[in-house]
Amino acid sequence: MSKGKDYAKYFDFSQAKVISEDENGKKIRLHGREIYIMSEPNQRQEKQRGKQDIQVHYEDAVPENLREIGNGKRYIIYTFGCQMNEHDSETMSGLLEQMGYEKTEDRKEADIILLNTCAIRENAEDKVFGELGHLKTLKLERPGLILGVCGCMSQEENVVNRIMSKHQFVDIIFGTHNIHRLPFLVRDALFNKEMVVDVWSKEGDIIENLPKKRSGMRGWVNIMYGCDKFCTYCIVPYTRGKERSRLPEDVIAEVRELARQGYKEITLLGQNVNAYGKDFIDRTYTFGHLMDEIRTIDLPRIRFTTSHPRDFDDHLIEVLAKQGNLVEHIHLPVQSGSSAVLKKMSRKYTREHYLQLVHKIKAAIPNVSLTTDIIVGFPGETDEHFEETMSLMREVEFEQAFTFIYSPREGTPAAQMEDNVPMEVKKERLQRLNALMKDFSRKGNEKLLGETVEVLVESESKNNELILSGRTRTNRLVHFAGSEELIGQFVHVEVTDIKSFYIKGELVTEKMQMSS
């Protein structure tokens, strides 16, 4: 049995007094603070996968009477976690700006501060509560400041109870399924002066036409929500709900609009993009069909993340092999090279199946760049199991890997397993894995020495404003000298030097051909 945190102290509400209760929720008083609980997370409900139809709604999310409520006020959103969280923050920014708020980078002048949280690993949770500790002082100095916690952590019962019990200076708590409710939650927090909790345990309908505040030349486009895989270590199926796909016509319309606005690159997002369309009951339309349509749009680069090997079918490989604006980079999380460990993880594929898939992809797309995710020290992982992971890494020759030491997440099946791999063993395995990955990354970069690569320039280097940084089609990071007016443009760069995790080069001045 895993030794997790003691959450029991956050579930003692014996001092709470119910002030009122009706079909819309209940109002309680706890430690002197009134809390309006419209809905709260329930993991038992989050585990269920109902058969009810998902409705698609297109109405405006911000009604006219809330469109000036933020005039003259500012907001800031701190985002923790994955690209899906980044995209959710873009939506929240769009909603707040339609309400009249303006973005700021200075928390001391913000009127609303939102923490958009991640629940994947325990250290992400610790960061959020650490940040709340810092913000408490700011709240004491400025009582009118609205503080909100949202995202995946808010979908966890223990987190919401902990905030209600120990962090009563927070004003709003909402989850991943009801981001469109943000304008109404802000209104309630402003005028009622009480903590508002509105976390839906059952995923809602699909809300289209939500405003988004994007920045830069790269855009995220959600194509689906949720995950039905229930890997034993993962909290996402509970925090993001069941798989539900946006209609292809809505996705394509959004991509076309981004192309019209001049975006150079988009990334299609989903917890498992390969499962796109499998929930449709009125049509046969898969992720491969969607990619085949989107590749005809006049947009230089199209990426997607993340893939589950079990759903990566032959039709998708056939479409990706057409390349053009479909970049030759695929992120394909394997998690472990041992079939025995994969079974305990409930990944629903074997080592052999994964390697067969990799060989199919490489045969169809010879210049493909593969990246992955690896967890070391999963319960029951032996030295032999870990060596199988190392040998799979050598066979596939990944360009990059995101590697993690296993840590249990409360509420997942793996948290009930005996965490029997000592921490010093986990750290030693991670060190060996990272050393191997560093070698492969460097070898991959060495193949480009003397070559000229297409780079989308993203920004000035953090360490030297005279150096620009950008990425190739295969997502390699490139540094080169150049002027800031090149940011947002495609350039050609000759590779002159290589490092383990990035390459250096010199700008080629002749006009380049677009990849699309």
Image (spheres, rainbow, N blue to C red):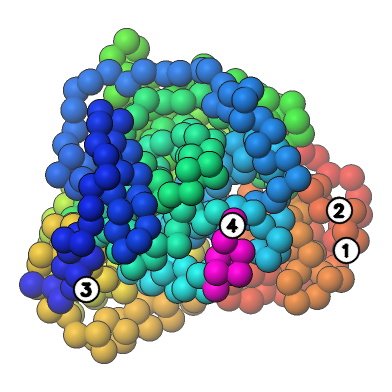
Residues at marks 4 and 2, CA–CA distance in whole angstroms: 39 Å
Q: Badge 4 local density, few (<14 within 10 Å), some, or many (20+)?
A: many
Residue range (magenta): 137-145
Which residue in the structure is indicated by mark 1? 482
Q: Is residue 124 magenta?
A: no
Q: Nearer the viewer, mark 3 or mark 1?
A: 3
- Dot 3 or dot 4: first in sequence order is 3
Q: Mark 3 points at which residue?
A: 5
Residue count near mark 2 (Cα–Cα under 10 Å), binned few <14, some 14–19, many ≥20:
some
Labels 1 and 2 touching (C-beta < 8 A):
yes
Q: How much space separates mark 1 and mark 4, taking CA atoms?
A: 42 Å
Quadrant where the C terminus lies? top right
Helix, strand or loop for disc 1? loop
Q: Which amino acid does label 1 sit on?
A: Gly
Q: How far apart are labels 2 and 3 at the CA level?
A: 49 Å
Q: Which picture quadrant has residue 52?
A: top left
Circle 4 sits on which residue? 145
Q: Which residue is drawn at 36% across and 52% down?
A: 34
Q: In which quarter of the image is residue 424?
A: bottom left
Q: What residue sits right under mark 2 in the picture?
A: 486
N-terminal label among 1 and 4 = 4
**Pointers 3 and 1 in contact (C-beta within 8 Å):** no
